[in-house]
Image (cartoon, helix red, strand yellow):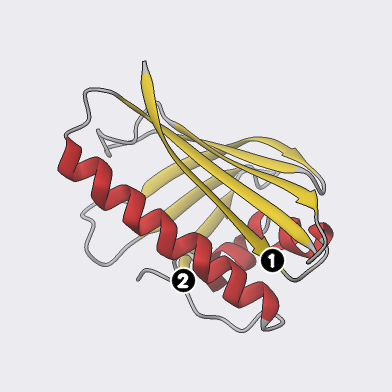
C-alpha cells in the first residue's frame, strides 16, 4: 500500500506552457532546484542536486505526453524515494491549467518524513505556479 502526497493548483497559463516547464531540465531548474542535469540521448534520465543532500537524486521520465502529463520514477541512494513515482497531470481550466501532482510513498515511511516531503512538494508546486505565471523567472524552491 502507498500513501500519496496529492496536490492541486490552478495556473494562469496554457497547458503547453506548464508542460514545457515540467518536462524540460531548464524549467525544472527554474522552479525546483537549480542543479538539474538531463542525461541520456533522449534526455529522459535526470539527476537532481541539492546542497543539503549527500548524493544526487536520479529520476527517469517514464511518461511525457504533451501537454497532458509527466511521470518520473525515482531511484538511487535516497531510500525513502527509491522505487517511488511522481506524476503531474495537466488539464485545461477556466484560469488556464489545473495541475494535479501526486507522489506515492510506502505506508512504512515515518509520519514525520512524510509530512516533511508533503510540505516540500507543496512549496515546489507553488513555485511552479509562480515561475510559469511570471513568464519563466527563475526562482527555485530548493537549493
Relative vertical location of residue 87 with respect to residue 49 in this rendering, above or below? above
27 left or right of 69 in image: left
Q: Position of residue 58 (x, y in %)?
A: 43, 43
142 left or right of 71 in image: left
Relative vertical location of residue 124 with respect to residue 114 in this rendering, above or below? below
Task: Give me the residue at 26% from left, 35% from top.
Answer: 80
Assess whether mark 1 and mark 2 are in contact (beta carbons under 8 angstroms): no
Relative vertical location of residue 14 with respect to residue 138 in this rendering, above or below? above
Separation (CA) of disc 2 from disc 1 = 21 Å
Task: Give me the residue at 63% from left, 42% from top.
Answer: 44
Which corner quadrant of the image does residue 51 belong to? bottom left
Label placed on residue 34: 2
Q: Which class describes the residues within 10 Å of circle 2: few (<14), some (14-19), or many (20+)?
A: many
In which quadrant of the rendered image does the C terminus lie? bottom left
In which quadrant of the rendered image does the N terminus lie? top left
2 left or right of 94 in image: left
Which residue ends up furthest to the top in the rendered image?
Answer: 1
Q: Where is residue 119 in the image (x, y as percent from the top left)?
A: 33, 56
126 left or right of 94 in image: left
Q: Which class describes the residues within 10 Å of circle 1: few (<14), some (14-19), or many (20+)?
A: many
Q: Where is residue 43 in the image (x, y as percent from the top left)?
A: 66, 47
Label placed on residue 11: 1
Relative vertical location of residue 139 with respect to residue 7 in this rendering, above or below? below
Which corner quadrant of the image does residue 41 belong to? top right
Amino acid at each position: 500500500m502507498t500513501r500519496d502526497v496529492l496536490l492541486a493548483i490552478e495556473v494562469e497559463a496554457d497547458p503547453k506552457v506548464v508542460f514545457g516547464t515540467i518536462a524540460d531540465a531548464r524549467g525544472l531548474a527554474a522552479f525546483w532546484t537549480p542543479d538539474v542535469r538531463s542525461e541520456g540521448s533522449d534526455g529522459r534520465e535526470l539527476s537532481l542536486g541539492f546542497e543539503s543532500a549527500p548524493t544526487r537524486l536520479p529520476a527517469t521520465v517514464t511518461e511525457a505526453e504533451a501537454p497532458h502529463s509527466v511521470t518520473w520514477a525515482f531511484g538511487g541512494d535516497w531510500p525513502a524515494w527509491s522505487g517511488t513515482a511522481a506524476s503531474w497531470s495537466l488539464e485545461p481550466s477556466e484560469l488556464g491549467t489545473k495541475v494535479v501532482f501526486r507522489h506515492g510513498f510506502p505506508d512504512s515511511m515515518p509520519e514525520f518524513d512524510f509530512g516533511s516531503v508533503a510540505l516540500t512538494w507543496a512549496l515546489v508546486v507553488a513555485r511552479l505556479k509562480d515561475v510559469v505565471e511570471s513568464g519563466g523567472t527563475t526562482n527555485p524552491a530548493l537549493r
